[in-house]
Amino acid sequence: MPIWIIAKYEILRFMRMRYVLIIQFLMPLLLIFILGSALSGAFKIEDRTLKPVKVDVVQSDSGVLSAGFKSFLSTPELMKIIQPMNIQSRDEAVKRLKSGDSEFALVIPSDFSSRVLEGEEAEWEMILGQDYGQNLTAKMTLRSFLDQVNYMQSAIISAGPGAAELLQKQGSDSSFNPTAEASSHVRLGKLTSSNSNYTAMQYYTASMLVMFLLYSGMGAALGLQGEKERHTLSRLNAMPIHEYQILLGKILGNMFSSIVQAALVIGATILFYGVDWGNDFFHLFLVCLLIIVASMSLAILIMLAAKSSKAISTTFQMIILAMTFLSGGFTPLPEGLLQRMGEFTLNHWAMQSMFRIMLGSDAAIIGHHLLILAGISGGLLLLSLMVYRKAGYHE
């Protein structure tokens, strides 16, 4: 069949180009090693001993909630996290913060309890110190008390004035502690109790594999354009072969080479770098196949739209580098606009699918990512077929 003969000779042509073999097979492994080794510290999660925060408390409130707050601060769990010290005024607390005698300050207004009981807006003033980590620890700890107060205030607003009177009556009872439950919400935990995260080597193995599989489409586009520029396409068209058979044969030949490339990269990273790809190699094969289909669809679109090999190379590189950057392929991006833009790229869903496979996620989660990836690849394939029907592959 002409299609398979053309695909065979395309593979042979590809194997004879040594520089392509170096770029397609050795370059990904080199980049994975460099990036995975150099940036391994950025992916390492460690448990650290929490240092108690020195908190100055300016307690001007003497209402029903003041006793509960004092009891809250004196619990053994809280004493491991914050070290409170009563201060008389806000100015003194600010002065101690500037001198380094304290690390955080809390100012409670005199009408705090009364405003809570009346169902009105009530707030604390938290004055931050110089250490971001200590500020975060103090804020999260003290907010556990505020969460309980908010719950109480919502009950007062819903039940009416009678609930406030009952609360004031209970407040005179020494055994009443509105924050007994809140204090139980504060506890120390471990981030590394489970290894549900990927390493730097796994991260860059996935990102570089996706990027170089997309680059295989550029090789296909340049090969197709080369037939035009060398005027060998006219000879092929002179034969009793339809032009779509020529195009399909060349695409299938490049797809086979890309599948071999993916298999060698995956095998080499397992053997030499110890990368854990998980046990779901079937879904991993589907991910690679979908990336290759998308890459070849891009090759057809760009080849039909561009007029020269230089234009094809420039366009392909701009698209691939932009998608790799937006998806965090070079370095993980912080939350924000760039990260949200990355969710519209092929690289993002390909990488996330590989990460889910590496971490052994549920089949439903992997299937969700695969479905979106298949939708993107299918859309590109459909668009390339529509454009091909109008433009055709000829000189």
Image (tube, rainbow, N blue to C red):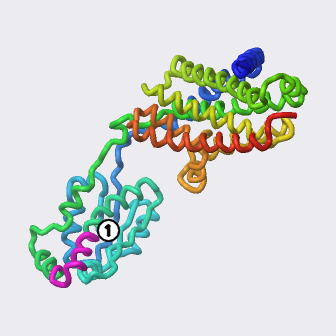
Query: Does the segment drawn in magenta span residue 150?
Result: yes
Residue 30 visible in the current orientation: no
At x 64%, y 22%, the residue is: 256
Image quadrant holding the C terminus, namely top right
Total numbered circles: 1
**Which stretch appears magenta?**
149-163
**Residue 156, quarter of the rendered image:** bottom left
Locate residue 357, reporting x and y percent. 45, 33
Circle 1: is it few (<14), some (14-19), or many (20+) Cα within 10 Å? many
Residue 139 visible in the current orientation: yes
Residue where numbered disc 1 is placed = 57
Is 29 above or below relative to 183? above
Locate residue 212, reporting x and y percent. 66, 31
At x 47%, y 25%, the residue is: 281
Q: Main secondary structure of the magenta part?
A: helix
Locate residue 221, reporting x and y percent. 76, 33
Image quadrant holding the N terminus, namely top right
Amino acid type, label 1? Val
Q: Is residue 348 left or right of residue 172?
A: right
Is 10 above or below relative to 330? above
**Residue 186, quarter of the rendered image:** bottom left
Closer to the camera in the image, 385 or 161: 385
Closer to the camera in the image, 346 or 226: 226
At x 53%, y 53%, the residue is: 335
At x 90%, y 26%, the residue is: 230
Query: Does the segment drawn in magenta span residue 370?
Result: no
Q: Is residue 29 left or right of residue 170?
A: right
Locate residue 74, reporting x and y percent. 21, 60
Closer to the camera in the image, 291 or 59: 291
Element class at badge 1: strand
